[in-house]
Amino acid sequence: MIRVLQKTATLGSGGIQKILVELQKNMDRNIVQYDYFLNLTEPDFYTDEVLSLGGKIYGRKHNVGNPVTKIIKRNVLFYKTIKENGYQIVHIDETLEMTAISVLIARLAGVKVIIAHSHNDHASEKIKWYLKYIIDPIARWINSTFATDYFACSQIAAKWLFTERLNEKGKIKVINNGINAALYEFDPKTRKKVREKLGIENNFVIGHVGRFYKQKNHKFILDTFSDIVRQKPEARLLLIGEGELKDSIKAYAEELGIADFVIFYGLSNEVNKLLQAFDAFIFPSIFEGLGIVAVEAQAASVQTFCAEETIAKEVNITPYCHYIPLSKGHEYWAKSIIEIACSYERKSTTKLIRDANFDIVTVAKDLETFYVQKVAAL
């Protein structure tokens, strides 16, 4: 058995963590087993599932000390974990700067296969000048020089984590964030059941899945919905997720006078079922590496509205995907959503998702083969 150490911040309800768990579930665990090194080992959304799949969890037990001290102690422990357990493969799923640090630590620990994996793109985000012009370029150089293998979930994500030169050489492998397409396939019975449970049987439902964090642009979502509900009083907004900005977003809904029309659902491990209740999925993120939830929405045959400037074109898989510039403003978004999503026929998209190589079984098996070949070559 090959034990791969995944280096990621948490086992929370984020997209990266979901992908890692789904990949493990679709691999032969007699061949490849994922273990995790986290910032903190406290119980989180996917902790029980990771343990049930045979994974080991490493990391600091207490988050004490100033930021610099915490980073140093965490990486000393990361080094010791690699050495004590003899990991031959370390797979890093972190931010640009943290990936660079982890790559160097893995090198120092003598790891033979170091995978730097880009899951995001912050190019559209306003960042401090010293990060943009000094620290980030150095981090890209480290990732491109000292990692042994280079993964990204999309072309725009590849440009964020690695140097322009490495991108031009074509050395970066795009690993699609796969899903179980059949699990999301549109089912009228499930739609009816979910809508009845939520009391939205006869409503026009706009939905979003994502943590309450500035990246996801929830204020823009509320502004857009405010325009929609003024024109269509039967409209409802279903927000799935948790996060640090949830209270402020609730307050903003109150400020706009639309709080009674918004459902703050919280976390769910049945997003596939909740998507059935949507008429439209709104996705105006300020930045994304790929945006796998847009693929999930399309798998449920939901009209999906993506920010043209930030959402990777790789998610444009079905006729249900639409790109709208954020620069057009929320009134234009509202108009487009009403025009397209108020009435339409939902047809199966499972074959289209699979043909686009977003099937999780295929992605997992290809990755499993990659690990095996890498170890065999050592």
Image (cartoon, helix red, strand yellow):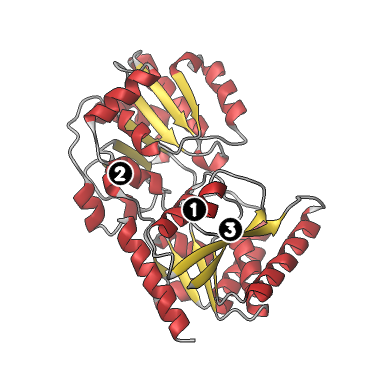
Q: Amino acid at mark 1?
A: Ile
Labels 1 and 2 touching (C-beta < 8 A): no
In the image, residue 24 sits, relative to residue 162, either above or below, namely: above
Q: Identify the residue position indicated by label 2 in the image.
A: 183
Which one is in front in this view, the residue at disc 3 or the one at disc 2? 2
Residue 122 visible in image: no
Q: Identify the residue position indicated by label 1 in the image.
A: 16
Lateral position of residue 221 relative to residue 233, left or right: right
Q: Identify the residue position indicated by label 3 in the image.
A: 8
- Going from N to C along the chain, the mark reached first, 3 or 2, is 3
Residue 120 percent coordinates (x, y):
49, 55
Q: Secondary structure at mark 3?
A: loop
Q: Secondary structure at mark 1?
A: helix
User: Alpha carbon of mark 3 to alpha carbon of mark 2: how far?
Assistant: 26 Å
Q: Nearer the viewer, residue 377 or 27?
A: 27
Residue drawn at the location 69% of the way across and 71% of the way down: 79
> How dense is the environment of label 1, judged by Cα within 10 Å: few (below 14), some, or many (20 and up)?
many
> How dense is the environment of label 2, judged by Cα within 10 Å: few (below 14), some, or many (20 and up)?
some
Residue 262 percent coordinates (x, y):
46, 21
